[in-house]
Image (cartoon, rainbow, N blue to C red):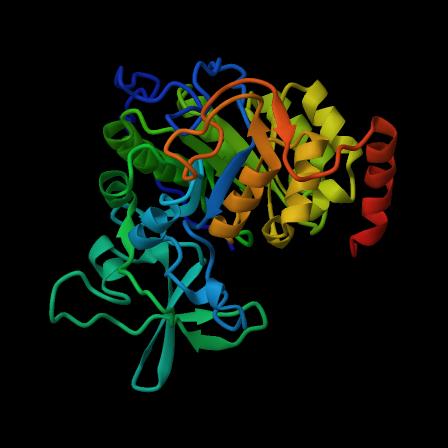
Amino acid sequence: MALKAVHVSDVPNLDQVPENASMALYSSRFAKGAEMNRAAPRIPRFLVIGHRGNGMNALQSSDRRMRAIKENSIMSFNAAARFPIDFVEFDVQVTKDDCPVIFHDDFILSEENGTVFQRRINELSLSEFLNYGPQREPGKEGKTLLRKTKDGKIVKWDVENDDPLCTLQEAFEQVDPSLGFNIELKFDDNIVYQDDYLFRVLQSVLQVVFECGRDRPIIFSSFQPDAALLVKKLQNTYPVFFLTNGGTQLYYDVRRNSLEEAIKLCLEGGLHGIVSEVKGVFRNPGAVTKIKEAKLSLLTYGKLNNVPEAVYMQYLMGIEGVIVDFVKEITVAVSDMIKPLGGAEEDGEKRLLEEDGPMQVKSKPEFSERELSFLLKLIPELIQL
C-alpha cells in the first residue's frame, strides 16, 4: 500500500536557518568546551536519553513504572528533565493539515458505542488529533484513548498520571530549554512512501524546529532510510542518525537489516551516526569497531538498556549513549559508574558530568583488554537470537 504523492511547490531553502539555531550536539548538560561541528559531531561523554520522555508505556506490564506517566507528553518530558539526562527521545508525525504532533503508534484508537475506530495520524486534522484523551480545557471531555498491544489486544490507555496529547511546537515552548530533543521522524514500516510526501512531512517538521529550536540541542533520527537521507539534505544544522534493529528483525528494505548496511547508508548519505537496538550490537560487537573506524557515533535503544550492567558494558565497549525507560534508575547507575577525574559535579547530586576530561569508573571493576575481549565474545552467546 502506497500513499498518494503530494506535490510540494515553492519549498523554502531550509539551509538558510536562524543564526541562533543550535549548531551542534551540546548543551549546559554536556561537558563544557565540547568540540563539535556539522561534519563530525563529537559526543563529549556518555549520554542518557529518556525514551518517549520519562519512559514508554507498557500498559499490561506488572511494573508500575511503565504506566506512571503518559509517554510522549509534556508532563513526561519535564519529569525526565528533573534527572541528569541529556535528551528526551520522542516520535513526530504530521497531521493532514501539516502540523507536527508527538505520537508513537501508527494508528490512534478510540471507542464509540462499543465500536473501536482507528485512524492514521496523517488522516486527522490537528483539532481532531488533540480531541483524543484528556483535554486542557476545563470541563471538556475528549475521546476515549485506546491502544493495541503487540499481541493484538486492545486496552484502555490508563496511566497513573495522564496528560493531553501535544504538538512539537508545544514541546519546544513548555519543556525545560536545556533539555535536548531527539526527534524521531516516525513512519509506518508497511508503507512505501513517495519522495514528495516525505518532502512535505519533513518541511513541516523543520519549519517548527527552525522557528522554535533556538539554542536547544537537537538531533534527528529515523528508521525510514529515505527520510533520514532527505532530512540531512534539507538542512545541515542538526545531526541526523539512522535507526536500525541491527539485524534482530528483517525488512524488505535491506538497508534496515544489519549494522553493516547502516554504516553504508550513513557514509553514503553523510549522516552522523547510528542508533541501534542494543541486542543488535551485543550479537555483533565487532560492528562497534567498524562504526568507530567510519567516524560515526553510536547510540542504542532497547529493553536491555534498563539494566545497569548492560549499560555499563556498553560504556566499556565505547558506545556513546543509551535510550532508556527507567530514567531515574539508569541516571543514578551511570552517575555511580562514571565520574570525571578530580571534577566536582554541578548542582550537587543532581547533575552528572559537567566537566570535560578523563573518565573513571566508581564502584565497578576495571577490565583488562583481554578480559573485555572475552566478554565481547561471550555476550552474543548469551543473547537469544
Q: Is residue 229 visible?
A: no
Name the residue nearer the viewer: 373 or 282.
Answer: 373
Locate residue 159, reporting x and y percent.
38, 69
Report the side of 323 relative to 78 (left or right).
right
Query: Where is residue 234 shown, x and y percent of the image?
Result: 40, 24
Question: Residue at 57% across / 67% down in the picture?
Answer: 150
Nearer to the camera, 237 or 43: 43
307 and 377: which one is in front? 307
Instruction: Give how far across and how far down residue 297 sits, in percent.
Output: 60, 26
Quarter of the picture holding the C terminus: bottom right
Instruction: Indicate whether 316 appears above or below 359.
Output: below
Specify whether residue 47 is in view.
yes
Q: Observer-nearest residue: 232 or 369?
A: 369
Residue 369 in picture, x, y percent from top left? 83, 27
Query: In the picture, residue 210 is in which quadrant?
Result: top left
* Vertical comparison of 83 with 133: above or below: above
Horizontal side of 280 relative to 79 (left or right) equals right
